[in-house]
Image (tube, helix red, strand yellow):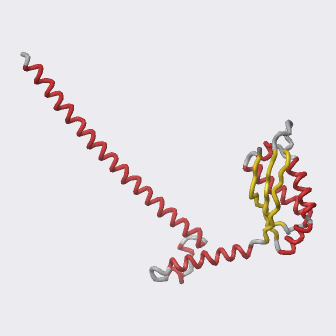
Amino acid sequence: MAKKPSAEPAGDIAVDLAAPTKSKKKLIIVIGLSLVLFGALGAGGYYFYKGMGNKSASGGDNATAPKSEAKAPAGHGEAKDAKETDHAAIALASNSGDLVSIPPFLVNLADPQGRRYLKLALDVELKDKAASDELNKNMPKIKDALILLLSSKTYEDLASIENKILLKKEIVERLTLILGEQKVMRVYITEIVIQ
């Protein structure tokens, strides 16, 4: 009788040893399939990204490309894409105006406790060289107008992205009052610290 109880645990041990090997095999299969799936997703994402990058660089999809590019032999398309990108960059640079950097402003904000301040640096894109010369000539007026504008703002007025965009529009309006119509193209915030 003593032998029967010892035989039963041996059978249980054999069953217990078989179960972990099956679960290990399932785990290895699941991990392998997961790696294949993630690899496929990664490769698909990469090709999608590269395809979208080429479309945006060339200005559209391949269906609207000129026929001379569509008939190009294999291997020559990459050189044409690089040339088109260079031409697009040159065209963009020629359409942009003169950039003038305005030194950083450090002003107290209009908060009730008066403990917050704003540091702001700007680049102003102007229509042409004559407009940039006029901006440099009127720099004291511009600094005065911008200091008055910035010091009237509170932390809440500047905290969100929408309010920063609104601030850029207000700066363009102030510069337009000083320099005249259609001379200021854009204002770029190059540094902003609100504390």
- Quick one: 101 or 131, which is closer to the camera? 101
Please state if 165 lies on the left or on the right of 26 as rendered. right
Q: Position of residue 44 (x, y in %)?
A: 45, 60
Q: Which residue is rendered at x = 73% and y = 76% of the image? A: 94
Q: Which residue is rendered at x = 85% and y = 69% of the image? A: 183
Q: Is residue 19 above or below residue 171?
A: above
Q: Position of residue 88 (x, y in %)?
A: 64, 75
- Quick one: 50 or 189, which is closer to the camera? 189
Please state if 177 lies on the left or on the right of 82 as rendered. right
Q: Residue furthest top?
A: 1
Q: Position of residue 12 (x, y in %)?
A: 17, 27
Q: Which residue is rendered at x = 31% and y = 42% of the image? A: 27
Quadrant in which the N terminus is drawn: top left
Classify residue 8 by image quadrant.
top left
Count numbered badges in the picture: 0
Q: Position of residue 28 (x, y in %)?
A: 30, 46
Quadrant in which the C terminus is drawn: top right
